[in-house]
Image: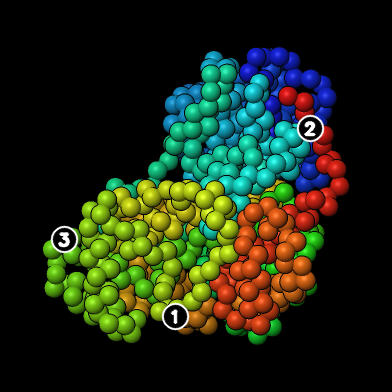
Amino acid sequence: MSLQAGIFYFDARPVPEREAAEILAGTFSHDCAAPTSYRCAGVLLVHADAQLDTRIPDAPQPLIGRRGAISFDGRLDNRDDLLLRLRDVLAGNRSDTALAAGIYGRWGAEGLLHLIGDWSLAIWDETEKAIVLASDFAGVRPLYYCVQQHRVLWSTRLAPIVAWADQNEIDDEYVANFLLLDGCPNRTPYRGIRSVPPGHSVRISRSGISIEPFWRLPIGNTIRYRSESEYEEQLRSLFSEAVRCRLRTTAPVLSELSGGLDSSSVVCMASHLLRSGDARAPRLVTLSCEHKGSRDKPFYTAVEKFCNVEGIHVPAADYPFLTEAQTGGAMPGFWEPMQSHAAALARQSGAKTYLTGHLGDIVMGNWWDDSEQLAGLMRAGRVGAALKDALSWSQVLRIPIYPILWRALLSSLPPSLTPATACRRDDDDGIARSTEDSLAPECRRRAGKNPLSREWMAAPPERRKYFRGVLETVQMRRLQPRAPLQHLGYTHPFAHRPLVTFMLSIPADIVCRPGEPRRLMRRSFHELWPPELRKRKSKDSFGGVFLDSLQPLASKLLERPQHLQVVERGYIDPANLKKRLEMLTHSLDCNEGQLRHIILLEFWLRAREKRLPPEVMPLSA
Protein backbone atom coordinates (compact mmCIF):
# COMPACT_ATOMS: atom_id res chain seq x y z
CA MET A 1 0.00 0.00 0.00
CA SER A 2 1.26 3.49 0.78
CA LEU A 3 4.72 4.38 2.09
CA GLN A 4 5.46 6.91 4.81
CA ALA A 5 8.52 8.37 6.48
CA GLY A 6 9.61 11.44 8.41
CA ILE A 7 11.89 13.23 10.84
CA PHE A 8 11.31 15.36 13.94
CA TYR A 9 14.00 17.52 15.56
CA PHE A 10 13.19 18.02 19.24
CA ASP A 11 14.65 21.53 19.32
CA ALA A 12 12.51 22.62 16.32
CA ARG A 13 15.56 23.36 14.13
CA PRO A 14 14.67 23.51 10.42
CA VAL A 15 15.02 20.19 8.62
CA PRO A 16 18.03 20.61 6.28
CA GLU A 17 17.21 20.49 2.60
CA ARG A 18 19.62 17.62 1.97
CA GLU A 19 17.93 15.51 4.63
CA ALA A 20 14.49 16.33 3.30
CA ALA A 21 15.61 15.34 -0.20
CA GLU A 22 17.07 12.04 1.06
CA ILE A 23 13.85 11.12 2.90
CA LEU A 24 11.75 11.96 -0.14
CA ALA A 25 14.05 9.85 -2.32
CA GLY A 26 13.95 6.96 0.18
CA THR A 27 10.15 6.98 0.06
CA PHE A 28 9.96 6.84 -3.71
CA SER A 29 8.50 3.71 -5.32
CA HIS A 30 7.46 2.87 -8.87
CA ASP A 31 4.35 1.28 -7.34
CA CYS A 32 3.21 4.50 -5.66
CA ALA A 33 2.53 8.08 -6.62
CA ALA A 34 5.36 10.60 -6.25
CA PRO A 35 6.04 11.37 -2.57
CA THR A 36 4.39 14.44 -1.06
CA SER A 37 5.36 16.14 2.18
CA TYR A 38 4.37 18.38 5.09
CA ARG A 39 6.94 20.63 6.76
CA CYS A 40 6.99 22.91 9.75
CA ALA A 41 9.63 23.88 12.29
CA GLY A 42 11.66 20.75 12.97
CA VAL A 43 9.16 18.37 11.35
CA LEU A 44 8.91 16.60 8.01
CA LEU A 45 6.19 14.06 7.15
CA VAL A 46 6.43 12.25 3.79
CA HIS A 47 3.82 10.06 2.11
CA ALA A 48 3.76 8.12 -1.19
CA ASP A 49 0.21 7.08 -2.06
CA ALA A 50 -0.93 3.77 -3.58
CA GLN A 51 -4.70 4.04 -3.72
CA LEU A 52 -6.53 0.71 -3.66
CA ASP A 53 -10.01 1.92 -4.51
CA THR A 54 -10.63 4.95 -6.69
CA ARG A 55 -14.30 4.87 -5.66
CA ILE A 56 -13.40 5.92 -2.11
CA PRO A 57 -12.58 9.62 -1.76
CA ASP A 58 -8.90 10.16 -1.13
CA ALA A 59 -7.41 13.27 0.46
CA PRO A 60 -3.93 14.60 -0.30
CA GLN A 61 -1.41 13.38 2.24
CA PRO A 62 0.01 14.26 4.64
CA LEU A 63 -3.34 15.67 5.78
CA ILE A 64 -3.10 18.98 7.62
CA GLY A 65 -5.53 19.61 10.47
CA ARG A 66 -6.07 21.90 13.43
CA ARG A 67 -3.76 19.87 15.70
CA GLY A 68 -0.97 19.24 13.19
CA ALA A 69 -0.69 16.70 10.38
CA ILE A 70 -1.09 12.98 9.73
CA SER A 71 0.18 10.42 7.22
CA PHE A 72 -1.79 7.18 6.97
CA ASP A 73 -0.96 3.85 5.34
CA GLY A 74 -3.65 1.22 5.11
CA ARG A 75 -7.34 0.42 4.84
CA LEU A 76 -10.21 0.99 7.29
CA ASP A 77 -12.96 -1.64 7.34
CA ASN A 78 -15.50 0.12 9.58
CA ARG A 79 -15.86 3.26 7.51
CA ASP A 80 -19.65 3.48 7.83
CA ASP A 81 -19.49 3.41 11.62
CA LEU A 82 -16.70 5.99 11.72
CA LEU A 83 -18.53 8.31 9.30
CA LEU A 84 -21.49 8.34 11.68
CA ARG A 85 -19.34 8.94 14.76
CA LEU A 86 -17.41 11.78 13.13
CA ARG A 87 -20.04 13.36 10.93
CA ASP A 88 -19.79 16.66 12.81
CA VAL A 89 -15.99 17.06 12.36
CA LEU A 90 -15.17 15.73 8.88
CA ALA A 91 -16.09 18.89 6.96
CA GLY A 92 -16.81 16.86 3.84
CA ASN A 93 -13.56 14.87 3.84
CA ARG A 94 -14.56 11.17 3.92
CA SER A 95 -11.13 9.61 3.33
CA ASP A 96 -9.62 6.97 5.60
CA THR A 97 -6.93 9.47 6.55
CA ALA A 98 -9.53 12.04 7.66
CA LEU A 99 -11.33 9.37 9.69
CA ALA A 100 -8.09 8.41 11.48
CA ALA A 101 -7.31 12.08 12.15
CA GLY A 102 -10.84 12.65 13.45
CA ILE A 103 -10.62 9.71 15.85
CA TYR A 104 -7.28 10.95 17.22
CA GLY A 105 -8.55 14.50 17.50
CA ARG A 106 -11.59 13.41 19.52
CA TRP A 107 -10.23 10.62 21.73
CA GLY A 108 -6.44 10.82 21.46
CA ALA A 109 -4.24 7.75 21.07
CA GLU A 110 -6.65 5.56 23.08
CA GLY A 111 -9.29 6.22 20.44
CA LEU A 112 -7.20 4.43 17.80
CA LEU A 113 -8.90 1.28 19.09
CA HIS A 114 -11.89 2.35 16.97
CA LEU A 115 -9.90 1.98 13.72
CA ILE A 116 -10.54 -1.54 12.39
CA GLY A 117 -8.39 -2.62 9.46
CA ASP A 118 -4.77 -2.95 8.36
CA TRP A 119 -3.02 0.34 9.02
CA SER A 120 -0.15 2.32 10.47
CA LEU A 121 0.10 6.07 10.89
CA ALA A 122 2.33 8.97 11.91
CA ILE A 123 0.82 12.06 13.55
CA TRP A 124 2.50 15.38 14.23
CA ASP A 125 0.66 16.66 17.32
CA GLU A 126 1.30 20.40 17.20
CA THR A 127 -0.37 20.95 20.59
CA GLU A 128 1.78 18.40 22.40
CA LYS A 129 4.88 19.02 20.24
CA ALA A 130 5.12 15.25 19.77
CA ILE A 131 5.18 12.62 17.08
CA VAL A 132 2.71 9.74 17.54
CA LEU A 133 3.35 6.48 15.67
CA ALA A 134 0.85 3.62 15.80
CA SER A 135 0.01 0.31 14.17
CA ASP A 136 -3.13 -1.84 14.03
CA PHE A 137 -3.68 -4.72 16.46
CA ALA A 138 -2.25 -7.34 14.08
CA GLY A 139 0.83 -5.32 13.02
CA VAL A 140 0.19 -5.86 9.32
CA ARG A 141 1.52 -2.55 7.98
CA PRO A 142 5.21 -2.05 8.87
CA LEU A 143 6.52 1.05 10.62
CA TYR A 144 10.07 1.44 12.01
CA TYR A 145 11.57 4.25 14.07
CA CYS A 146 14.91 5.33 15.52
CA VAL A 147 15.23 7.79 18.41
CA GLN A 148 18.55 9.66 18.60
CA GLN A 149 19.84 12.45 20.82
CA HIS A 150 18.20 15.35 19.00
CA ARG A 151 15.65 13.69 16.73
CA VAL A 152 13.48 10.75 15.75
CA LEU A 153 13.28 9.16 12.29
CA TRP A 154 10.58 6.77 11.03
CA SER A 155 9.80 4.84 7.86
CA THR A 156 7.66 2.09 6.37
CA ARG A 157 10.86 0.62 4.93
CA LEU A 158 13.67 -0.69 7.07
CA ALA A 159 16.61 -0.28 4.66
CA PRO A 160 16.34 3.53 4.22
CA ILE A 161 16.05 4.24 7.94
CA VAL A 162 19.17 2.13 8.60
CA ALA A 163 21.06 4.39 6.19
CA TRP A 164 19.50 7.67 7.36
CA ALA A 165 20.21 6.94 11.02
CA ASP A 166 23.64 5.40 10.29
CA GLN A 167 22.63 2.53 12.58
CA ASN A 168 24.23 -0.46 10.88
CA GLU A 169 25.46 -2.12 14.08
CA ILE A 170 23.89 -5.53 14.69
CA ASP A 171 21.59 -5.87 17.72
CA ASP A 172 22.89 -8.99 19.48
CA GLU A 173 19.74 -9.31 21.59
CA TYR A 174 17.67 -9.49 18.42
CA VAL A 175 20.02 -12.14 16.99
CA ALA A 176 19.85 -14.29 20.13
CA ASN A 177 16.06 -14.27 20.14
CA PHE A 178 15.94 -14.76 16.37
CA LEU A 179 17.92 -17.98 16.83
CA LEU A 180 15.80 -19.11 19.78
CA LEU A 181 12.32 -17.83 18.93
CA ASP A 182 12.40 -16.84 15.23
CA GLY A 183 12.31 -13.15 16.11
CA CYS A 184 12.27 -10.53 18.84
CA PRO A 185 9.21 -8.37 19.54
CA ASN A 186 9.56 -4.69 18.65
CA ARG A 187 13.24 -5.00 17.68
CA THR A 188 15.06 -5.19 14.36
CA PRO A 189 18.52 -6.59 13.48
CA TYR A 190 19.94 -3.06 13.95
CA ARG A 191 20.73 -1.60 17.33
CA GLY A 192 18.52 1.37 18.12
CA ILE A 193 15.96 0.78 15.34
CA ARG A 194 12.63 -0.52 16.61
CA SER A 195 9.31 -1.48 15.10
CA VAL A 196 6.10 0.05 16.41
CA PRO A 197 4.41 -2.62 18.59
CA PRO A 198 1.08 -3.86 17.19
CA GLY A 199 -1.91 -2.39 18.96
CA HIS A 200 0.24 0.32 20.58
CA SER A 201 0.95 4.00 20.14
CA VAL A 202 4.48 5.40 20.49
CA ARG A 203 4.57 9.06 21.57
CA ILE A 204 7.96 10.75 21.11
CA SER A 205 8.77 14.27 22.24
CA ARG A 206 11.60 16.27 23.71
CA SER A 207 10.68 14.99 27.16
CA GLY A 208 10.93 11.32 26.25
CA ILE A 209 9.17 8.29 24.81
CA SER A 210 5.99 6.63 26.01
CA ILE A 211 4.52 3.41 24.58
CA GLU A 212 0.89 2.65 25.44
CA PRO A 213 -1.48 -0.10 24.30
CA PHE A 214 -4.83 0.84 22.81
CA TRP A 215 -5.83 -2.81 22.17
CA ARG A 216 -5.67 -5.85 24.44
CA LEU A 217 -6.63 -9.49 24.08
CA PRO A 218 -10.38 -9.96 24.63
CA ILE A 219 -9.70 -12.14 27.66
CA GLY A 220 -12.85 -11.16 29.54
CA ASN A 221 -15.18 -11.70 26.57
CA THR A 222 -17.63 -14.60 26.65
CA ILE A 223 -20.12 -15.37 23.90
CA ARG A 224 -22.67 -18.18 24.27
CA TYR A 225 -25.54 -18.95 21.91
CA ARG A 226 -28.45 -21.30 22.39
CA SER A 227 -27.68 -23.51 19.42
CA GLU A 228 -24.62 -24.49 17.40
CA SER A 229 -26.28 -23.25 14.23
CA GLU A 230 -26.07 -19.70 15.61
CA TYR A 231 -22.28 -19.99 15.97
CA GLU A 232 -22.10 -21.27 12.39
CA GLU A 233 -24.21 -18.40 11.04
CA GLN A 234 -22.19 -15.78 12.91
CA LEU A 235 -18.88 -17.24 11.72
CA ARG A 236 -20.08 -17.24 8.10
CA SER A 237 -21.24 -13.64 8.43
CA LEU A 238 -17.98 -12.44 9.99
CA PHE A 239 -15.81 -14.31 7.50
CA SER A 240 -17.84 -12.97 4.60
CA GLU A 241 -17.29 -9.43 5.89
CA ALA A 242 -13.58 -10.13 6.51
CA VAL A 243 -13.10 -11.07 2.85
CA ARG A 244 -15.51 -8.47 1.42
CA CYS A 245 -13.75 -5.49 2.99
CA ARG A 246 -10.43 -6.74 1.60
CA LEU A 247 -11.92 -6.80 -1.90
CA ARG A 248 -12.49 -3.05 -1.69
CA THR A 249 -10.35 -2.30 -4.72
CA THR A 250 -10.67 -1.28 -8.35
CA ALA A 251 -7.63 -3.41 -9.28
CA PRO A 252 -7.33 -7.19 -9.69
CA VAL A 253 -6.77 -9.29 -6.57
CA LEU A 254 -4.05 -11.93 -6.12
CA SER A 255 -4.75 -14.66 -3.55
CA GLU A 256 -2.48 -17.38 -2.22
CA LEU A 257 -3.91 -20.87 -2.71
CA SER A 258 -2.08 -23.77 -1.11
CA GLY A 259 -5.01 -26.20 -1.21
CA GLY A 260 -5.27 -26.10 2.59
CA LEU A 261 -8.54 -25.17 4.27
CA ASP A 262 -7.51 -21.61 5.16
CA SER A 263 -6.30 -20.27 1.81
CA SER A 264 -9.02 -22.27 0.01
CA SER A 265 -11.70 -20.71 2.22
CA VAL A 266 -10.45 -17.23 1.37
CA VAL A 267 -10.51 -17.97 -2.38
CA CYS A 268 -13.92 -19.66 -2.24
CA MET A 269 -15.49 -16.80 -0.27
CA ALA A 270 -13.88 -14.15 -2.50
CA SER A 271 -15.16 -15.94 -5.59
CA HIS A 272 -18.65 -16.23 -4.10
CA LEU A 273 -18.76 -12.51 -3.23
CA LEU A 274 -17.60 -11.49 -6.70
CA ARG A 275 -20.11 -13.75 -8.45
CA SER A 276 -22.98 -12.51 -6.28
CA GLY A 277 -22.05 -8.85 -6.82
CA ASP A 278 -21.38 -8.26 -3.08
CA ALA A 279 -17.81 -7.27 -3.97
CA ARG A 280 -16.67 -5.32 -7.02
CA ALA A 281 -13.00 -6.15 -7.58
CA PRO A 282 -12.57 -6.69 -11.32
CA ARG A 283 -10.73 -10.04 -11.19
CA LEU A 284 -9.44 -12.74 -8.84
CA VAL A 285 -6.22 -14.65 -9.61
CA THR A 286 -4.77 -17.40 -7.42
CA LEU A 287 -1.09 -18.17 -6.81
CA SER A 288 0.02 -21.71 -5.86
CA CYS A 289 3.46 -23.09 -5.09
CA GLU A 290 4.15 -26.45 -6.76
CA HIS A 291 6.71 -29.00 -5.65
CA LYS A 292 7.52 -32.61 -6.44
CA GLY A 293 5.29 -35.10 -4.64
CA SER A 294 2.89 -32.40 -3.43
CA ARG A 295 -0.33 -33.61 -1.83
CA ASP A 296 -1.84 -30.15 -2.27
CA LYS A 297 -2.21 -30.09 -6.06
CA PRO A 298 -5.49 -32.06 -6.31
CA PHE A 299 -7.05 -29.67 -3.81
CA TYR A 300 -5.94 -26.32 -5.20
CA THR A 301 -6.81 -27.40 -8.73
CA ALA A 302 -10.25 -28.47 -7.44
CA VAL A 303 -10.73 -25.01 -5.89
CA GLU A 304 -9.66 -23.29 -9.12
CA LYS A 305 -12.21 -25.34 -11.09
CA PHE A 306 -14.98 -24.92 -8.50
CA CYS A 307 -14.48 -21.13 -8.36
CA ASN A 308 -13.69 -20.76 -12.07
CA VAL A 309 -10.63 -18.60 -11.36
CA GLU A 310 -7.32 -18.21 -13.14
CA GLY A 311 -4.58 -20.06 -11.29
CA ILE A 312 -0.84 -19.36 -11.53
CA HIS A 313 1.36 -22.32 -10.53
CA VAL A 314 4.93 -21.46 -9.52
CA PRO A 315 7.54 -24.26 -9.20
CA ALA A 316 9.26 -24.11 -5.82
CA ALA A 317 12.44 -25.45 -7.45
CA ASP A 318 12.70 -22.27 -9.54
CA TYR A 319 12.27 -19.93 -6.54
CA PRO A 320 14.02 -21.66 -3.63
CA PHE A 321 13.33 -21.42 0.08
CA LEU A 322 16.83 -20.04 0.65
CA THR A 323 19.84 -19.27 -1.52
CA GLU A 324 23.30 -17.96 -0.73
CA ALA A 325 22.58 -14.60 -2.36
CA GLN A 326 18.90 -14.09 -1.50
CA THR A 327 18.52 -13.91 2.26
CA GLY A 328 15.81 -11.32 2.88
CA GLY A 329 17.43 -7.91 2.30
CA ALA A 330 17.49 -5.55 5.26
CA MET A 331 16.04 -8.22 7.55
CA PRO A 332 16.86 -11.96 7.35
CA GLY A 333 14.04 -13.96 5.82
CA PHE A 334 13.22 -17.10 3.88
CA TRP A 335 11.49 -17.38 0.48
CA GLU A 336 12.86 -14.07 -0.88
CA PRO A 337 13.00 -15.42 -4.48
CA MET A 338 9.37 -16.55 -4.28
CA GLN A 339 8.22 -13.26 -2.74
CA SER A 340 10.03 -11.21 -5.39
CA HIS A 341 8.42 -13.33 -8.09
CA ALA A 342 4.97 -12.91 -6.50
CA ALA A 343 5.51 -9.14 -6.49
CA ALA A 344 6.44 -9.26 -10.18
CA LEU A 345 3.32 -11.30 -10.98
CA ALA A 346 1.20 -8.75 -9.11
CA ARG A 347 2.68 -5.92 -11.19
CA GLN A 348 2.08 -7.84 -14.41
CA SER A 349 -1.57 -8.46 -13.55
CA GLY A 350 -2.12 -4.96 -12.13
CA ALA A 351 -3.06 -6.41 -8.71
CA LYS A 352 -2.76 -4.18 -5.65
CA THR A 353 -4.24 -6.61 -3.10
CA TYR A 354 -2.66 -9.88 -1.96
CA LEU A 355 -4.84 -12.21 0.15
CA THR A 356 -3.49 -15.00 2.38
CA GLY A 357 -4.90 -17.61 4.76
CA HIS A 358 -2.44 -16.74 7.55
CA LEU A 359 -3.67 -17.09 11.17
CA GLY A 360 -6.44 -19.46 10.10
CA ASP A 361 -4.84 -22.48 11.80
CA ILE A 362 -4.86 -20.71 15.15
CA VAL A 363 -8.21 -18.95 15.24
CA MET A 364 -10.09 -21.85 13.61
CA GLY A 365 -8.79 -24.42 16.10
CA ASN A 366 -6.63 -26.64 13.92
CA TRP A 367 -5.52 -28.67 16.94
CA TRP A 368 -5.45 -32.44 16.89
CA ASP A 369 -4.79 -32.23 20.64
CA ASP A 370 -6.85 -29.57 22.42
CA SER A 371 -7.28 -31.58 25.61
CA GLU A 372 -6.55 -28.47 27.70
CA GLN A 373 -10.30 -27.95 27.35
CA LEU A 374 -10.68 -30.32 30.31
CA ALA A 375 -9.26 -27.63 32.60
CA GLY A 376 -12.41 -25.54 32.14
CA LEU A 377 -14.59 -28.46 33.18
CA MET A 378 -12.40 -29.11 36.23
CA ARG A 379 -12.54 -25.47 37.32
CA ALA A 380 -16.32 -25.60 36.98
CA GLY A 381 -16.44 -28.69 39.20
CA ARG A 382 -17.77 -30.89 36.36
CA VAL A 383 -15.55 -33.85 37.20
CA GLY A 384 -17.74 -36.44 35.48
CA ALA A 385 -17.80 -34.50 32.21
CA ALA A 386 -14.02 -33.98 32.46
CA LEU A 387 -13.41 -37.72 32.86
CA LYS A 388 -15.70 -38.51 29.93
CA ASP A 389 -13.92 -36.00 27.66
CA ALA A 390 -10.51 -37.17 28.88
CA LEU A 391 -11.40 -40.68 27.75
CA SER A 392 -12.42 -39.34 24.32
CA TRP A 393 -9.13 -37.43 23.95
CA SER A 394 -7.18 -40.49 25.12
CA GLN A 395 -8.80 -42.67 22.46
CA VAL A 396 -8.23 -40.14 19.68
CA LEU A 397 -4.62 -39.37 20.66
CA ARG A 398 -3.86 -43.01 21.50
CA ILE A 399 -2.15 -42.13 24.76
CA PRO A 400 -3.05 -43.02 28.37
CA ILE A 401 -5.68 -40.93 30.09
CA TYR A 402 -3.44 -40.02 33.05
CA PRO A 403 -1.07 -37.49 31.36
CA ILE A 404 -4.11 -35.81 29.80
CA LEU A 405 -5.78 -35.40 33.20
CA TRP A 406 -2.51 -34.26 34.81
CA ARG A 407 -1.91 -31.54 32.23
CA ALA A 408 -5.53 -30.38 32.55
CA LEU A 409 -5.17 -30.29 36.33
CA LEU A 410 -2.05 -28.11 36.06
CA SER A 411 -3.85 -25.79 33.64
CA SER A 412 -6.80 -25.44 36.01
CA LEU A 413 -4.60 -23.98 38.77
CA PRO A 414 -4.46 -20.17 39.26
CA PRO A 415 -2.27 -18.53 36.59
CA SER A 416 0.50 -17.77 39.07
CA LEU A 417 0.85 -21.50 39.82
CA THR A 418 0.39 -22.85 36.30
CA PRO A 419 3.63 -23.64 34.43
CA ALA A 420 3.75 -22.20 30.92
CA THR A 421 4.57 -25.71 29.62
CA ALA A 422 1.03 -26.77 30.52
CA CYS A 423 -0.16 -24.69 27.55
CA ARG A 424 1.47 -25.96 24.38
CA ARG A 425 1.49 -23.91 21.19
CA ASP A 426 1.59 -26.91 18.86
CA ASP A 427 0.30 -30.45 18.77
CA ASP A 428 2.60 -33.08 20.28
CA ASP A 429 2.67 -36.31 18.29
CA GLY A 430 4.64 -38.06 21.03
CA ILE A 431 7.76 -38.60 18.89
CA ALA A 432 10.98 -37.57 20.64
CA ARG A 433 12.98 -35.13 18.50
CA SER A 434 16.23 -33.23 18.85
CA THR A 435 16.04 -29.89 20.63
CA GLU A 436 19.68 -28.82 20.16
CA ASP A 437 20.14 -25.16 19.26
CA SER A 438 23.97 -24.70 19.09
CA LEU A 439 23.87 -21.29 20.81
CA ALA A 440 27.05 -20.23 22.55
CA PRO A 441 26.61 -19.46 26.27
CA GLU A 442 27.19 -15.72 25.76
CA CYS A 443 24.58 -15.58 23.03
CA ARG A 444 22.09 -17.41 25.24
CA ARG A 445 22.80 -14.91 28.02
CA ARG A 446 22.06 -12.03 25.64
CA ALA A 447 18.64 -13.48 24.92
CA GLY A 448 17.85 -13.02 28.60
CA LYS A 449 14.26 -13.27 29.74
CA ASN A 450 11.75 -14.46 27.16
CA PRO A 451 10.51 -11.20 25.55
CA LEU A 452 7.11 -12.67 24.61
CA SER A 453 4.20 -11.46 26.70
CA ARG A 454 2.42 -13.91 29.01
CA GLU A 455 -0.78 -11.90 28.99
CA TRP A 456 -2.52 -14.99 27.58
CA MET A 457 -2.09 -16.74 30.94
CA ALA A 458 -4.97 -14.63 32.30
CA ALA A 459 -7.35 -16.24 29.79
CA PRO A 460 -9.60 -19.18 30.73
CA PRO A 461 -7.35 -22.28 30.66
CA GLU A 462 -9.40 -24.03 27.98
CA ARG A 463 -8.75 -21.11 25.60
CA ARG A 464 -5.16 -20.16 26.47
CA LYS A 465 -3.70 -21.95 23.46
CA TYR A 466 -5.77 -19.77 21.14
CA PHE A 467 -4.88 -16.53 22.93
CA ARG A 468 -1.21 -17.47 23.06
CA GLY A 469 -1.10 -18.28 19.36
CA VAL A 470 -2.72 -14.99 18.35
CA LEU A 471 -0.64 -12.86 20.72
CA GLU A 472 2.70 -14.38 19.74
CA THR A 473 1.86 -14.15 16.04
CA VAL A 474 1.12 -10.43 16.23
CA GLN A 475 3.98 -9.68 18.65
CA MET A 476 6.45 -11.24 16.22
CA ARG A 477 4.79 -9.31 13.35
CA ARG A 478 4.46 -12.54 11.38
CA LEU A 479 1.55 -11.03 9.44
CA GLN A 480 3.69 -8.18 8.12
CA PRO A 481 4.72 -8.33 4.44
CA ARG A 482 8.34 -8.82 3.55
CA ALA A 483 9.99 -5.97 1.65
CA PRO A 484 9.14 -7.17 -1.90
CA LEU A 485 5.41 -7.17 -1.06
CA GLN A 486 5.14 -3.98 1.02
CA HIS A 487 3.64 -1.97 -1.82
CA LEU A 488 0.66 -4.36 -1.95
CA GLY A 489 -2.41 -4.53 0.23
CA TYR A 490 -0.95 -7.68 1.80
CA THR A 491 -3.80 -8.80 4.03
CA HIS A 492 -5.26 -11.71 5.98
CA PRO A 493 -9.03 -12.22 6.35
CA PHE A 494 -8.53 -14.55 9.32
CA ALA A 495 -6.86 -11.61 11.12
CA HIS A 496 -10.04 -9.48 10.80
CA ARG A 497 -10.40 -8.13 14.33
CA PRO A 498 -14.16 -8.79 14.77
CA LEU A 499 -13.62 -12.37 13.55
CA VAL A 500 -10.64 -12.93 15.87
CA THR A 501 -12.55 -11.48 18.84
CA PHE A 502 -15.53 -13.75 18.14
CA MET A 503 -13.42 -16.91 17.84
CA LEU A 504 -11.51 -16.09 21.05
CA SER A 505 -14.76 -15.48 22.94
CA ILE A 506 -16.79 -18.62 22.21
CA PRO A 507 -16.51 -21.98 24.05
CA ALA A 508 -13.46 -23.99 22.96
CA ASP A 509 -15.49 -27.18 22.49
CA ILE A 510 -17.55 -25.43 19.82
CA VAL A 511 -14.36 -24.74 17.85
CA CYS A 512 -12.63 -28.09 18.27
CA ARG A 513 -13.50 -31.49 19.79
CA PRO A 514 -11.73 -34.87 20.07
CA GLY A 515 -11.03 -36.04 16.54
CA GLU A 516 -12.66 -32.90 15.10
CA PRO A 517 -10.11 -30.12 14.51
CA ARG A 518 -11.71 -27.01 12.98
CA ARG A 519 -15.12 -28.37 13.95
CA LEU A 520 -16.99 -25.08 13.72
CA MET A 521 -15.15 -24.03 10.56
CA ARG A 522 -16.03 -27.27 8.78
CA ARG A 523 -19.70 -27.04 9.73
CA SER A 524 -19.92 -23.36 8.81
CA PHE A 525 -17.97 -23.40 5.51
CA HIS A 526 -19.06 -26.83 4.23
CA GLU A 527 -21.19 -25.49 1.38
CA LEU A 528 -18.56 -22.93 0.43
CA TRP A 529 -15.99 -25.60 -0.51
CA PRO A 530 -15.76 -28.01 -3.46
CA PRO A 531 -16.54 -31.65 -2.56
CA GLU A 532 -12.86 -32.65 -2.64
CA LEU A 533 -11.96 -30.09 0.03
CA ARG A 534 -14.79 -31.08 2.37
CA LYS A 535 -13.16 -34.48 2.82
CA ARG A 536 -9.61 -33.21 3.33
CA LYS A 537 -7.99 -34.18 6.64
CA SER A 538 -4.26 -34.18 5.80
CA LYS A 539 -1.82 -31.31 5.43
CA ASP A 540 1.09 -31.18 3.00
CA SER A 541 4.70 -30.90 4.13
CA PHE A 542 7.38 -28.76 2.53
CA GLY A 543 10.14 -30.68 4.31
CA GLY A 544 11.64 -31.88 1.03
CA VAL A 545 11.58 -28.35 -0.42
CA PHE A 546 13.40 -27.01 2.64
CA LEU A 547 16.05 -29.75 2.50
CA ASP A 548 16.67 -29.20 -1.21
CA SER A 549 17.69 -25.61 -0.39
CA LEU A 550 19.45 -26.21 2.91
CA GLN A 551 21.64 -29.23 2.24
CA PRO A 552 23.90 -27.56 -0.38
CA LEU A 553 24.27 -24.55 1.91
CA ALA A 554 25.10 -26.79 4.87
CA SER A 555 27.78 -28.52 2.80
CA LYS A 556 29.27 -25.14 1.92
CA LEU A 557 29.42 -24.11 5.58
CA LEU A 558 31.15 -27.38 6.48
CA GLU A 559 34.09 -26.43 4.27
CA ARG A 560 35.32 -23.91 6.90
CA PRO A 561 33.17 -24.37 10.04
CA GLN A 562 35.62 -22.44 12.24
CA HIS A 563 35.48 -19.33 10.04
CA LEU A 564 31.78 -18.61 10.00
CA GLN A 565 30.47 -15.18 10.95
CA VAL A 566 28.02 -16.70 13.44
CA VAL A 567 31.02 -18.33 15.15
CA GLU A 568 33.37 -15.34 14.99
CA ARG A 569 30.67 -13.08 16.45
CA GLY A 570 30.19 -15.46 19.38
CA TYR A 571 26.66 -16.53 18.52
CA ILE A 572 27.23 -20.23 17.85
CA ASP A 573 29.32 -23.09 19.27
CA PRO A 574 31.32 -24.36 16.23
CA ALA A 575 31.70 -28.01 17.32
CA ASN A 576 28.00 -28.47 17.95
CA LEU A 577 27.09 -26.69 14.71
CA LYS A 578 29.48 -28.85 12.70
CA LYS A 579 27.85 -31.99 14.06
CA ARG A 580 24.36 -30.76 13.27
CA LEU A 581 25.28 -29.59 9.76
CA GLU A 582 26.69 -33.05 9.01
CA MET A 583 23.45 -34.61 10.27
CA LEU A 584 21.43 -32.26 8.07
CA THR A 585 23.40 -33.23 4.96
CA HIS A 586 22.42 -36.85 5.71
CA SER A 587 18.75 -35.94 6.40
CA LEU A 588 19.04 -36.97 10.07
CA ASP A 589 17.11 -35.45 12.97
CA CYS A 590 18.99 -32.31 14.03
CA ASN A 591 16.30 -29.81 15.11
CA GLU A 592 16.18 -28.65 11.51
CA GLY A 593 13.72 -25.81 12.21
CA GLN A 594 16.23 -23.97 14.39
CA LEU A 595 19.21 -24.92 12.23
CA ARG A 596 17.50 -23.19 9.28
CA HIS A 597 17.77 -19.91 11.18
CA ILE A 598 21.49 -20.37 11.85
CA ILE A 599 22.12 -21.05 8.14
CA LEU A 600 19.96 -18.08 7.14
CA LEU A 601 21.72 -15.77 9.60
CA GLU A 602 25.18 -16.82 8.39
CA PHE A 603 24.44 -16.11 4.75
CA TRP A 604 22.52 -12.94 5.61
CA LEU A 605 25.57 -11.62 7.49
CA ARG A 606 27.77 -12.47 4.50
CA ALA A 607 25.41 -10.78 2.05
CA ARG A 608 25.27 -7.73 4.33
CA GLU A 609 29.05 -7.30 4.09
CA LYS A 610 29.02 -7.65 0.29
CA ARG A 611 26.33 -5.06 -0.34
CA LEU A 612 27.25 -1.96 -2.27
CA PRO A 613 27.36 1.36 -0.38
CA PRO A 614 23.80 2.34 0.59
CA GLU A 615 21.78 4.24 -1.95
CA VAL A 616 20.78 6.69 0.75
CA MET A 617 23.51 8.51 2.68
CA PRO A 618 23.32 8.96 6.47
CA LEU A 619 21.49 12.04 7.72
CA SER A 620 23.91 13.80 10.05
CA ALA A 621 22.43 14.04 13.54
Q: Nearer the viewer, residue 202 or 577?
A: 577
**Nearer the N terminus, badge 1 or badge 2?**
1
Residue 318 visible in the snapshot: yes
Q: Which residue is at 18% across, 75% downward?
A: 387
Which amino acid type is shown beneath numbered disc 1? Answer: Ile
Q: Nearer the viewer, mark 3 or mark 2?
A: 2
Sequence order check, earlier mark of 3 and 1: 3
Q: Which residue is nearer to you in this view: 84 or 448?
A: 448
| Element on which disc 3 rests | loop
> Quick one: label 1, few (<14), some, or many (20+) residues within 10 Å?
few
- Res 65 visible: no
* Residue 431, disc: 1
Q: Nearer the viewer, residue 512 or 148?
A: 148
Quadrant location, the C terminus: top right
How far is disc 1 from disc 2 in space, using C-alphas? 52 Å
* Residue linked to disc 2: 618
Query: Residue beneath label 3, please?
Result: 380
